[in-house]
Amino acid sequence: MKNIGIILVRIALLLLLAGLFFGHLASETYQMTEAKNGVLGFLSLRPLHVSSAYLGIITAGLGFISIVIQKRKNTFLSKLLQYSHLALWVIALIGIFYSYFTGDFGGREYWEFNPIWAVPIFVSFIIFLIYYLYQLGFKEKWNVYQWMWLTGIIFFIFTFIENYLWLFPYFRSHFIADMTLQWKVNGSLVGAVNQIIYGVAFYLMEKISGDNKTSYQKLSFALYFLGLFNLMFNWGHHIYLLPTEKIIHYIAYAVSMTEWILFIRIFYKWNKQIKENKQHYYFFPYRFLMAADYWVIINLGMALLMSIPAINLYTHGTHITVAHAMGTTIGINTMIILAASFYFIKPTFLSKKTLKLNSLFFWSTQLILLTFLISLIGMGIQRALWQVGLKKSTFSQMTQASSLWTLLFIILGTLLMIFMGYFIIYLILKSLKKNQVT
Amino acid sequence: MNLNIFQQPRKVFIILFSFFFLFSLWIYAIPLFSNYQKPVKESKSIANGRLVWQKYNCHTCHQLYGLGGYLGPDLTNTYSRNKENETYLKGIIKSGVRQMPKFNLTDDETRELLAFLKDVDASGTADVNSYQPEINGTFSLKK
């Protein structure tokens, strides 16, 4: 049977590549002094960049799940469900890009395309849920990553419905309630996608270490429920400034602080982590998992601080938030996707020379990403100082004052596109050559 | 610490999801308990203005309460920023400025977008200087 999972992974890699390219074009707008219209205008480039990256991450997650669960059953119904899901997903992607290229907007931030294209996304997810449950069945005990995948799929569907409640004037005409709901959706959707991607990381670790007991342990489930609890209730930290019900802010503040448990646990397990890094370092797919682990530390640290309302007050609405978002999507999600892609497509290198070259590209990517995030934080600090009134200038003067940071951001963004693009193109070509997954 | 409860993931999942669902229902009901109920016509204009905001992708560059894009300034309180606010805003929309292109909005769209921005402005302030941090890590409006 043809492996549908790898087709999804290839589509995902192409989307991530497109995300990098559109991101590079969009970043150049920061240096322009005149407006551009059409597809090359910022109004089209930002949605193209964000949607390509976001949909790329989701597609990759679904692709890896498909690869893993496809082996369990091979019936007519399995095939029907898989092909239906793939067909609808591709229709949605074509529709979304058609929408962006023709300037047919109307949706909300991150989902700017004509809302009609939300229909095939929604139906394809329902089909994927049925496929997932059919493949796994209910007879055996599920391990933690199987629960994480189910959680991701269910919450994606639930929040995706909420994502379109604005179609009803009841919600739209109450601005504060509408914004509250919009950011409930954005927060929970990211959480749902993270459950899928982190589930993939758990699966990879199980296979690499050969230890399949951890995924059934009580502690693993306890940490999974902590993540789920945060997915459900911590989204309010996006809207501390919004004058919505105070209780939403307090719940978000309290729930977000439970993530200190994860942060402290990382340092508690530090020695074990280092030992594991040394043990598996030369297995190339592991390299990206290791990178994701370290990016988790940086981003979780940032997230914890930014979830404290008194700190959030000053970082909110600045590029510090963007640095956190980029750190999460590139540093964590994309590193896990690259780890899984290498694992399924090209787990080992036959020649030492190729390994050395790829190692060089790997470390260069990490360094560029770190400096890229620093440049965003630099831009963010400039804006934060302006927001509190420490710099008496107009908005335009403030952006000009941070032009050095902006230039750094554009240069490093371009380098990131080249280095990450190398890995992505390499994986696409290898997957086509081999035409099967390991 | 007793972690036995986590041996029953289905039960824990259902309990957590039930709380989440109830929390969601309460959020959907917030407009019902709002103190400020607007006249139907005004309410319709604001709801349509939100659609204009989306149709022209204003959030790509601008923020409301610090949420949105970063290329342009936050527009939460732009409606009341100067005396001739409506004329000024109409001018900016029609002619554009720096990276912002000019937009060809119809008269109805312009009116609805301004009604929306007026409503946003009346909902509160996004000026960081209007708030003060509290000792418990939260912040509140300055008195």
Image (spheres, rainbow, N blue to C red):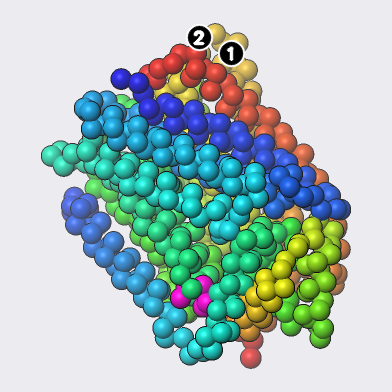
Establish if A309 lies above or below A429.
Answer: below
Disc 1 target residue: A354
At a point 39% along the width and 50% down the height, the residue shown is A122
User: Furthest-top residue in view?
Assistant: A351
In the image, residue A308 lies at what x, y percent? 54, 67
Q: How many marks?
A: 2
Q: Main secondary structure of the magenta part?
A: helix
Chain that bears disc 2: A
A218 sits to left or right of B41: left
In the image, residue B117 lies at what x, y percent? 66, 76
Location of the C terminus of chain A (image quadrant): top left
Q: Is residue B76 visible?
A: no
- Circle 1 — which element? helix
- A171 part of magenta stretch: yes
Q: Quadrant of residue A313?
A: bottom right
Question: For this rendering, which residue is in front, A368 or A185?
Answer: A185
Three-letter code for the amino acid on which mark 1 is drawn: Thr
Q: Quadrant of residue A329?
A: top right
Bounds of the magenta segment: A170-174
In the image, residue A113 lies at what x, y percent? 56, 51
Question: For this rendering, which residue is in front, A401 or A426?
Answer: A426
A296 sits to left or right of B81: left
Q: CA distance from mark 2 to mark 1?
A: 8 Å
Disc 2 target residue: A350
Three-letter code for the amino acid on which mark 2 is drawn: Leu
Establish if A100 lies above or below A358.
Answer: below
- A310 part of magenta stretch: no
